[in-house]
Image: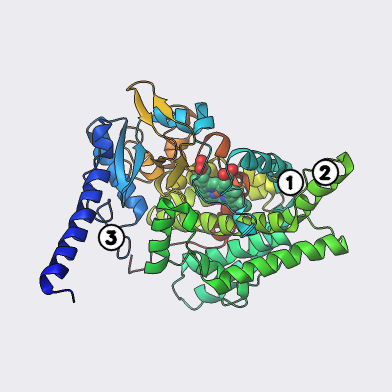
Amino acid sequence: MIGYVEIAIIFVTVGLSVYLYFKRSYSYWKKRKVPYIEPRIPWGIKENPLRPTKSLLMQMKEFYNEFKAKDYAFGGLYFLTSPVLLLVEPELIKKVLSKDFPYFTSHGIHVDEEKEPISGNLFSLDGEKWRNMRIKLTPTFTSGKIKTMYHTMLKCGEPMIEHISSLSTNGKPLNCKEVLACFTTDVIGSCAFGVECNSFKDPDADFRRHGRELFKLTWRSNLSRFINLLFPKLKLPTINKETRQFFCDTFSNIVTHRKKTDIRRDDFVQLMLEINKKAEANGSNDSLNVGQMTAQSIMFFAAGFETSSTTMTFCLHELAHNLDIQERLRNEINATMQKYDGKLTYDGILEMKYLNMVIDETLRKYPAGSLLHRVCTKDYTIEETGTKIQAGTRVFVSILGLQRDPEYFPNPDKFDPERFSDENKRKIRSFTYLPFGEGPRICIGLRFGVLQAKLGLCLLLKNFIFTPHKSL
Ligand code: HEM
């Protein structure tokens, strides 16, 4: 029989061992003479990821500010007991993302294509596999290919305008985020897979419902994301089973059906099938199997609808509060449409300079992907300080920190599209404006994302005037 004293000794011993383990782990940055944010047991960072009062992205911006205020080029953090390096100085960021990219090729996501084919998507792959997939997919995202999708995109705008018109005549407020997510879901569904998602007819239609699930934040998904950052091999699910199954089944059925029937459409699935036809004709083994195509399709869907709809939502928020900017943009849209026989054309959208400035400024103040994430794949030495980054160390860049840094963007909370006029744009310091990342892993869907955001805004502004709801 174990008595109270023995139980107490076990508790004290276990408690002390855990404490000493944390203490030892938390000496990592100190030993390397790297400045660091004082860690807290057990999460390392201040916030509890189960009940955060601030998002991880906002916390990273605050850490960036703390290091920057002390003039540090980089600084250390801890996630639980794992060390993470946060970069601050743009020259160093340039080296990691671009010049010395071979040391930082990975996004640090565990891939197991055999057990989990959808893990083999471009965003998650690294090393040679990533490079090969990137080379195969790059031709899918050229301006020429995106242009062929423009008319499909434009058609998806019609139900959005009908939907808002029905609400605005009733004087009801508009939930911009939801409406724009319906629009981008319909766009990505049609342009990527030739599927009509019908998000406006039925707000609970499958694609919209499961799309919402993909980005739902719950304590469980927060914790899984946090733990996956530390232990990628665990690959804890961040989305529910039903949603995952829906996307796997739907996309693999689409790809298989297209392969069988040889139906042609101007969409991403078609472009992936053409990669295969070319590979067969050349006798190369560059083709994509159904699992690989399904993996890319799910990633296009997830990456494609949320980023652009968030960007448009923030843009409308600023335009509603800055009616002079809204009016100037509307005038540009109307003038350009007049030039093109009253039509909203692809060429017209590309010509609109002020629209470009407004989008650039929105992506500065509200970058949809606020944190860049790399894992060091080979030991690397920071030349200036001689600091060694060990292989396996996570390296972060806070886009939000850089883009709201008053040194690079004076008065950073002011929404000011003039920062991106031809003259001012040239003065922006390189590697301080990174809404799409930089270097070889820069966002592959940049053109597509910007085009759908620009089109959505033009459709809205030519039809409606936006003002803040009284609650804002
Ligand atoms: C406004 C819209 C968008 C924003 C702000 C955005 C932002 C980003 C950012 C910050 C990254 C990380 C880059 C890095 O690690 O250096 C990224 C990567 C990526 N994005 Fe986007 N994105 C947008 C739209 C899209 C669209 C529409 C697609 C696809 C249809 C897409 C597909 C991807 C993919 C596949 C990657 C990973 C690329 C790689 O690792 O090689 N994105 N995006």
Residue on which the image places disc 2: 279
Quarter the C terminus occupies: bottom left
Residue 130 is situated, as x and y percent measured from the top left of the image, at: 62, 42
Q: Which residue is mark 1?
A: 145
The residue that appears at 46% across and 69% down in the rendered structure is: 175
Task: Indicate left or right for 454 with 45 as reference.
Answer: right
Q: Amino acid at mark 1?
A: Lys
| Identity of the residue drawn at 25% across and 50% down | 21
Front in this rendered view, residue 396 or 283: 283
Picture layout, residue 351 above or below residue 81: above
- Residue extending furthest left? 5
Quadrant position of the N terminus in the picture? bottom left
**Which amino acid type corresponds to the residue marked 2 in the rendered image?**
Ala
Q: Residues within 10 Å of mark 2 (few under 14, many from 20)?
A: some
State left or right for residue 290 relative to residue 248: right
Q: Position of residue 166 (x, y in %)?
A: 56, 76
For label 2, the SS is: helix
Q: Give the camera-side residue of 177 and 333.
A: 177
Residue 349 at x, y percent in the picture = 63, 46
- Identified by mark 3, the residue type is Asn
Label 2 lies in ligand 1 vicinity (Cβ under 8 Å) = no
- Which class describes the residues within 10 Å of circle 1: few (<14), some (14-19), or many (20+)? some
Secondary structure under tag 3 reads loop
Comes first in the chain, label 1 or label 3: 3
Q: Residue furthest front?
A: 1
Q: Is residue 241 above or below residue 234?
A: below
399 relative to 202 in the view: left or right: left
